[in-house]
């Protein structure tokens, strides 16, 4: 649920606006940190950089590297409507481009839940080798491998809610996310597994992190991502639940250390 009272921003941080290629203005938070590798943190569905659970991750990661946390379209202070992962790679590209323009030598994207699918698709669809801002490494935490997944109660509820006007109104009022009512194109966008395969084919480091207590996506999801992407790293975390709401400081720190090692090559 979206935090009604935004967290105070860390000292020395700045709120910035970034503009996507399809002209959606996004809210972002830049938190300085040591080094030249910027970490772009991408929240899950109904998230925001102003949420306490996201804020805790951002502050922890900023002890190791600078962080740029975005509100994806349709979330928090950003404009537009969420497309549940379809257009959101443009949001990550806007944040990565801002980081490059700021002078950071490397950019690593870290996504949670829906944000995990988004960072996978961004790295595959907007690689730096093709002239985009891109990513130098990718971390997908608690993400799905397959579109239209309805195998757990939370995902069945979400699909029903997104598919009805009353459900979208509930999501907007209670969860704080504005859902685009337009259907996805046919065929659907590149899947997370297809994106993961392209990421490692491009030579980019990829880390897949998942908990064995995840109530949204069972372990066939991270395993499918890992199997699709030869050379990727897979961490199955005992007792870890789902995404930002369950991650602790130790796991956040380990992700940060992996990121810095992977980005340096």
Image (cartoon, helix red, strand yellow):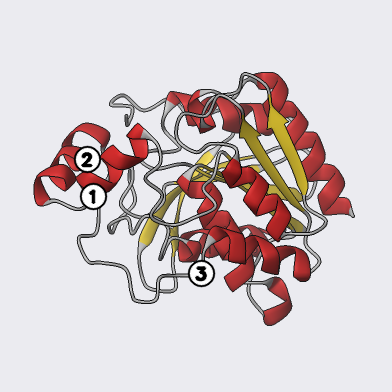
Task: Please state which of residues 220 and 206 is positioned toward the viewer in this rendering.
Answer: 220
**For residue 67, what is the image quadrant?**
top right
Q: Which residue is mark 3?
A: 190
The residue sitting at 64% across, 51% down in the picture is 224
Q: Secondary structure at mark 3?
A: loop
Is there CB contact under 8 Å for labels 1 and 3? no
> Most extreme residue toward the left, as rendered?
166
The residue sitting at 31% across, 24% down in the picture is 5
Task: Work out how far the residue at label 2 is from the one at label 1, CA to CA, in angstroms.
Answer: 8 Å
* 182 on left or right of 198: left
The residue sitting at 65% across, 66% down in the picture is 134
Q: Which residue is mark 1?
A: 162
Task: Please state which of residues 39 and 162 is positioned toward the viewer in this rendering.
Answer: 162
Say which label, 2 or 1, has the lower sequence index.
1
Q: Secondary structure at mark 2?
A: helix
* 265 on left or right of 7: right
Q: Is residue 91 visible?
A: yes
């Amino acid at each position: 649920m979206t935090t009604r009272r935004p967290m105070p921003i860390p000292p020395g941080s700045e709120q910035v606006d970034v503009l996507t290629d399809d002209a959606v203005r996004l809210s972002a938070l830049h938190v300085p940190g040591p080094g030249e590798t910027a970490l772009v943190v991408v929240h899950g569905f109904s998230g925001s950089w102003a949420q306490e659970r996201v804020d805790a991750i951002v502050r922890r990661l900023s002890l190791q590297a600078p962080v740029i946390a975005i509100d994806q379209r349709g979330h928090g202070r950003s404009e537009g409507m969420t497309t549940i992962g379809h257009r959101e790679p443009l949001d990550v590209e806007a944040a990565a481009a801002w980081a490059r323009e700021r002078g950071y030598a490397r950019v690593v994207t870290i996504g949670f839940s829906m944000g995990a699918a988004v960072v996978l698709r961004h790295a595959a669809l907007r690689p730096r080798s093709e002239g985009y801002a891109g990513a130098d490494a990718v971390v997908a935490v608690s993400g799905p491998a397959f579109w239209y997944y309805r195998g757990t109660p939370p995902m069945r509820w979400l699909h029903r809610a997104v598919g009805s006007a009353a459900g979208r109104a509930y999501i907007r009022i209670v969860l704080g996310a504005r859902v685009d009512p337009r259907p996805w194109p046919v065929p659907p966008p590149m899947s997370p597994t297809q994106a993961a395969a392209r990421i490692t084919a491009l030579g980019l480091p990829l880390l897949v992190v998942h908990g064995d207590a995840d109530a949204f996506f069972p372990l066939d999801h991270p395993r499918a991502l890992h199997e699709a992407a030869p050379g990727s790293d897979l961490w199955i975390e005992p007792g870890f639940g789902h995404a930002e709401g369950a991650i602790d400081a130790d796991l956040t720190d380990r992700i940060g250390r992996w990121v810095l090692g992977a980005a340096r090559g």
